[in-house]
Amino acid sequence: MLSVEQITSAQKNNINVLFGLTETAFSGVEKLVELNLAAAKAAFSENAHHVQSLIAIKDPAEVVALQSSYYQPIAEKGVAYSRHIYDIATSTGSELSKSIESQAQEAQHAFMTLIDSASKNAPQGSEAAVAMFKNAMSASQNAMETAQKAIKQVTQTAEANLQSAVSSASAAAKTTKRRTAA
């Protein structure tokens, strides 16, 4: 049987974990807000500068040159912005995942300790039921580990695909920039 101290300790631990997860999530959101504010500020500044440059133009040929120089780096900035968002999301997700995985392992260990303790005090003749329960717990633990490995593998594949897409977009933006400059 669980004592009041064990239950209280478990509840305190759960609250601490919840606060830790919440803090990690808010940190990720804060980084996204900072990124968006910086991007908005930069876009506003660039647009203001561009409008000032357009107002100062006297020759129509200069308009074409100015417009091409203005729109040229947009793809590169879009790729950089997307990469920042991806980095924030993956680092926040990784931190959350590690914390949840750690807590799951601790909970499994505590539960198995409880089962071991209960099985020592189980009445005679219940050995088969206790063994079946332990086997079921072991099987669920193995299934959870397999699922975690699969999730990590899918995440790594998605990350590799995203990196490939970002590299392709960067290369395309550079090619466009070279063609426009020539």
Image: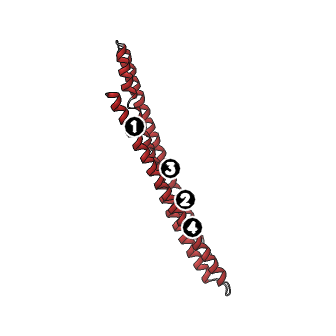
Q: How many marks?
A: 4
For the residue marked with disc 1, what is the amino acid?
Ala
* Closer to the eye: label 1 or 4: 1
Q: Which image quarter holds the N terminus?
A: bottom right
Residue 172 shows which numbered tag?
A: 1
Is 122 left or right of 176, judged from the image as shown?
right
Above or below, comparing residue 70 to residue 134 in the picture = above
Q: Which circle's residue, 3 or 1, is located before the other in the chain?
A: 3
- Label 2 neighbourhood size at 10 Å, few (<14), some (14-19), many (20+)? few
Q: Quadrant of residue 58?
A: top left
For the residue marked with disc 3, what is the amino acid?
Ala
Above or below, comparing residue 145 to residue 29 in the picture = below
Q: Tell me whether circle 3 and circle 1 mark residues in contact (CB < 8 Å).
A: no
Q: Which circle's residue, 2 or 3, is located before the other in the chain?
A: 2
Label 2 to label 3: alpha-carbon separation: 15 Å
Residue that label 3 marks: 25
Q: Which circle's residue, 4 or 2, is located before the other in the chain?
A: 2
For the residue marked with disc 2, what is the amino acid?
Ile
Label 4 to label 3: alpha-carbon separation: 27 Å
Q: Secondary structure at mark 4?
A: helix
Q: Which image quarter holds the C terminus?
A: top left
**Residue at image location 60% in from the left, 70% down from the top:** 4
Label 1 to label 2: alpha-carbon separation: 49 Å
Q: Quadrant of residue 51?
A: top left
**Residue at image location 38% in from the left, 26% down from the top:** 70
Q: Residue extending furthest bottom? A: 124
Q: Tell me whether circle 1 and circle 4 mark residues in contact (CB < 8 Å).
A: no
